[in-house]
């Protein structure tokens, strides 16, 4: 089928998505232009900043792809102090970022839960409850998630990693602590509690094929997701998956596939928030700007104190390890302008899809 006919179909089948993911040359360009036009007519040119605080690299899980997995003995573990978190929050607030993301390895236990609850209360006090807060702290009990929601966290990011259960099994230890069904169930719980629900996948993993990626896109649509953060898989030498590095598609191909995934997602879920992820910037210095041009509308500048950054290497070659938050902000603003976007300072930038699903807009 011609690219025009394909793009204008009212609904894409899995086969259509596989075909579009394989587009090259002028067809690829047309896909990007079309996605860009859909973006402009639904969510517009605005890009929202979420200040990212990588709160701790302590993790109780052992995902085979991740550099901070509990089993990696080659890193020093850290947790950002309460005051440092609040300083980063203050920076975000004063610079009109309007939202932050608090991310960490997955932990349970009362102490950790209380720490987060305390931080949420402190942030509320500091910002009068006017700062958008996203949590990305892995799987938690319903009670914990409800407690954090009641303390002002309104968004939660929990990537499904891959939507194919068999592939999920290959990428994680085979035990109840790493269970695909449980992960999917968490998304339902988050929705029931009232969170704006974010998920996502990695792109270019070993054993992953275009059909899997097409299924990932259909998963987001079927599950009525409000926000997505997805990006290329990048290997890390202290992980089990590193042994398969020779079987990977090239970094360039992983980047290209990720860009097409963003474009297609914008077309099939036009009103959601889509992040231009750091992993995209890792594989291409202009990766985030390119993602913004084809569909993304959220960027997460890193506000983690520089001394901890080296400790939060989920994958190799993570950028901006030594850049202070203020430097990051100035260069990003200029770069986004060049990419034709406007930074929406002072606007929380909730997911439009979320408000529509609530029947409010
Ligand atoms: N512990 C939480 C949040 C931190 S990890 C959780 O797992 O949900 C955040 C994300 O980093 C993961 O969801 C995963 O998609 C991504 N990630 C981990 N290792 C990666 C790698 N090697 N390449 C690319 N992304 C990776
Ligand atoms: Fe831990 Fe998240 Fe890394 Fe898995 S992906 S090992 S849960 S930090």
Image (tube, rainbow, N blue to C red):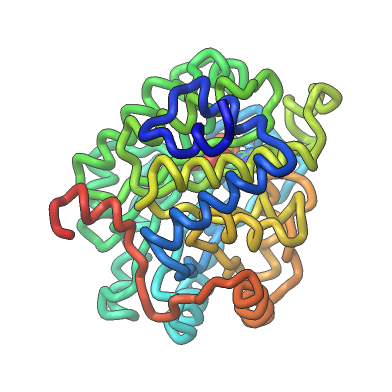
Q: Residue furthest left?
A: 359
| Placement of the C terminus among the 4 image quadrants | bottom left
Q: Is residue 323 left or right of residue 162?
A: right
Above or below, 230 against 319 in this view is above
Residue drawn 33% across the image and 54% down it: 155
Q: Nearer the viewer, residue 99 or 79?
A: 99
Above or below, 122 against 292 in this view is below
Q: Residue furthest bottom?
A: 94
Residue 133 x %, y %: 36, 63
Q: Is residue 87 left or right of residue 305?
A: left
Is residue 106 shown to the viewer in this render?
no
Is residue 52 shown to the viewer in this render?
yes
Residue drawn 22% across the image and 47% down it: 146
Residue drawn 39% across the image and 75% down it: 98
Residue 256 x %, y %: 70, 42
Figure quarter occupied by ligand 1: top right
Q: Quadrant of residue 74?
A: top right
| Placement of the N terminus among the 4 image quadrants | top right
Residue 198 x %, y %: 39, 46
Residue 33 x %, y %: 57, 53
Q: Quadrant of residue 109?
A: top left
Q: Nearer the viewer, residue 267 or 297?
A: 267
Report how many numbered discs are placed on residues in the image.
0
Residue drawn 53% across the image and 58% down it: 55
Q: Quadrant of residue 233?
A: top right
């Amino acid at each position: 089928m011609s690219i025009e006919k394909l793009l204008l179909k009212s609904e894409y089948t899995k086969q259509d998505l596989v075909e579009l993911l394989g587009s090259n040359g002028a067809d690829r360009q047309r896909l990007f232009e079309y996605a860009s036009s859909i973006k402009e007519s639904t969510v517009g040119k605005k890009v929202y900043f979420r200040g990212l605080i990588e709160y701790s690299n302590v993790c109780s899980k052992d995902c085979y792809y991740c550099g901070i997995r509990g089993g990696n003995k080659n890193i020093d573990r850290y947790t950002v102090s309460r005051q440092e978190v609040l300083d980063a929050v203050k920076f975000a607030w004063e610079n009109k970022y309007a939202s932050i993301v608090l991310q960490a390895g997955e932990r349970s236990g009362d102490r950790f839960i209380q720490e987060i609850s305390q931080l949420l209360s402190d942030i509320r006090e500091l910002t009068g409850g006017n700062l958008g807060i996203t949590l990305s702290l892995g799987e938690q009990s319903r009670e914990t998630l409800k407690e954090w929601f009641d303390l002002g966290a309104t968004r939660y990011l929990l990537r499904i990693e891959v939507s194919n259960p068999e592939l999920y099994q290959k990428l994680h230890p085979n035990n109840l602590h790493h269970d695909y069904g449980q992960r999917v169930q968490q998304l339902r719980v988050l929705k029931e509690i009232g969170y704006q629900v974010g998920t996502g996948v990695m792109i270019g993993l070993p054993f992953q094929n275009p059909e899997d990626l097409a299924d990932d896109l259909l998963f987001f649509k079927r599950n009525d997701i409000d926000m997505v953060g997805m990006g290329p898989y990048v290997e890390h030498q202290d992980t089990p998956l590193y042994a398969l590095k020779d079987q990977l598609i090239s970094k360039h191909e992983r980047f290209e596939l990720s860009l097409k995934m963003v474009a297609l997602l914008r077309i099939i879920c036009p009103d959601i928030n889509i992040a231009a992820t750091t992993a995209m910037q890792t594989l291409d210095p202009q990766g985030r700007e390119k993602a913004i041009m084809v569909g993304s509308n959220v960027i997460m500048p890193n506000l983690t104190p520089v001394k901890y950054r080296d400790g939060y290497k989920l994958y190799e070659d993570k950028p901006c390890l030594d850049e202070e938050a203020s430097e990051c902000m100035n260069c990003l603003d200029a770069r986004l302008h060049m990419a034709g976007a406007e930074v929406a300072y002072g606007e929380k930038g909730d997911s439009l899809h979320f408000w529509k699903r609530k029947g409010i807009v």
